[in-house]
Image: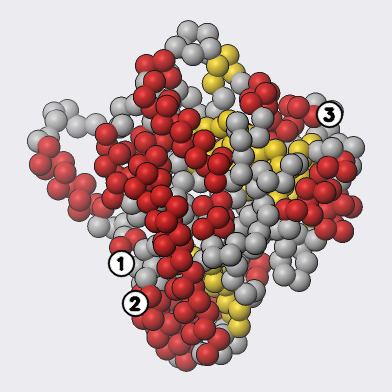
Amino acid sequence: MQPEGLNRKTVLSELKKIQQQDKRYDDGKILCSMCTRPHPIAEKAYRLFLSSNLGDPGLFPGSVQLEKDVICQLATLLHGTNCVGSIVSGGTEANFLALLAARNIAHVDRPEVVLPESTHFSFTKICNMLNLKPVYAGLDRSFKVDLTSIKECVTNNTVAIVGTAGTAELGVIDSIEELSKVALEHNVWLHVDAAFGGLVIPFLNDSKYLFDFSLETVKSITVDPHKMGMAAIPAGGIIFRNPQELDFIKTETPYLTDNFQYTFVGTRTGASAASAWAVFKVLGMTGFKKIVGNCMKTTQLLTDGLEDAGFSLVVEPTLNIVAFRSGNDTKLLSEKLWKKGWFVSYIPRYDCIRVVVMPHVTRKHAVVFLKDLVNSNKK
Ligand code: 0PR
């Protein structure tokens, strides 16, 4: 730290200069992110609650109310009643809390968790931290978890089965209904990671996917407002079906304004809950349907354009994620795209390029991208 403080103007202008190194969602060129520019009302709400700390709830009852309300709205969207939960740092912490509860409730000596091969890498961290043995189930030809494989993975030590509603790489929705039958048969916890899909699937036209609390064996769901919920980072969400389950993840906080915490993070901003709350209020179901509808239309435009240009899709998109291969070197193509300023992901295990069609990616951007893509593939 420098000995004397600088004036604010100088500091701000320095910050702005440094910020120019960061990519901007508004340019429509970030195609590899599951986050987007927060909704303008999210920014305002966030600023308003900047000093709120949900880690000491007695001081911030208003923020507590907002968090409860957001959780209640998310739970209702996912067909839950009387659910409980928290707005946390992200999908990683949400998944962590779900498996913490499942492990503590099962209370077995050598706990294992059954994970589809397609689960998010956060589960690798979580297994490490919770001393859980991950047992991986294979995928079928549509990249959903293979049910025969799931059944083979379940043992007496299984504390939970995880299904994903919108995988990070391909946007695939596992057959949660089938998983719930297996969970019921073996009486194990079923956790659904809908970090991304939880705020997409309910807004699809004629959504036919059963993935939420409407299935009785689903015990917990991760759903992140900071992804398709357009809230400011950090806003992950964990929802538990039964309030009693919180007892298994609580930590005593003897001298704070509340006696227990139910999250991993201690000091945590109330601004996240406020930003999610404000977006839900401003958009409502209709607003979300419109945004998701536009993302899906742009996804279709991209898909058609890719097929017309001779690229092959890894899988027909279910959500607003497109994964494709070129007949040539797909990895090299992704590198060329980066050089041209298109920030795509390259996924080694499927040897494909992945584009996440978030709200900041418009039709116009998709058209220019397709043109640049075809040209890059030629040379
Ligand atoms: N579960 C699923 C299904 C996810 O897609 C993600 C994150 C997580 C859990 C973990 O969530 P947090 O990262 O909030 O803890 N999915 C994105 C991904 O891995 C995260 C991300 C977002 C990465 C924006 C990059 C980026 O620019 O792609």
Q: Amino acid at mark 1?
A: Asp
* Label 2 crowd (10 A; few <14 / some 14-19 / many >=20): few
Residue ranking furthest to the top: 255
Mark 1, ligand 1, within 8 Å: the answer is no
Q: Is residue 194 left or right of residue 178?
A: left
Q: Pointer 1: what residue?
A: 27
Where residue 127 appears, x then y in whole percent?
A: 70, 40
Q: Pointer 2: what residue?
A: 364
Q: Secondary structure at mark 1?
A: helix
Q: Nearer the viewer, residue 157 or 6?
A: 157
Q: Is residue 14 left or right of residue 181?
A: left
**The C terminus appears in which quarter of the rendering?**
bottom left
Residue 339 position by quadrant: bottom left
Q: Kindly identify the residue that appears in the image at 34 percent across and 48 percent down.
A: 282
Q: Kindly identify the residue that appears in the image at 26 percent across and 53 percent down.
A: 19
For marks 2 and 1 on the same chain, the one whose residue lies earlier in the sequence: 1
Q: Is residue 61 above or below residue 80?
A: above
* Label 3 crowd (10 A; few <14 / some 14-19 / many >=20): few
Q: Pointer 3: what residue?
A: 108
Q: Kindly identify the residue that appears in the image at 63 percent across and 55 percent down.
A: 165
For marks 2 and 3 on the same chain, the one whose residue lies earlier in the sequence: 3
Q: Is residue 301 above or below residue 54?
A: below
Where residue 76 appears, x then y in whole percent?
A: 55, 41
Q: Closer to the observer: label 2 or label 3? A: 2
Where residue 287 appears, x then y in whole percent?
A: 39, 56
Q: Kindly identify the residue that appears in the image at 14 percent across and 48 percent down.
A: 13
Q: Amino acid at mark 2?
A: Lys
How many angstroms separate mark 1 from mark 3 (CA)? 51 Å
The reply to whether discs 2 and 1 touch (Cβ–Cβ < 8 Å) is no
The reply to whether discs 2 and 3 touch (Cβ–Cβ < 8 Å) is no
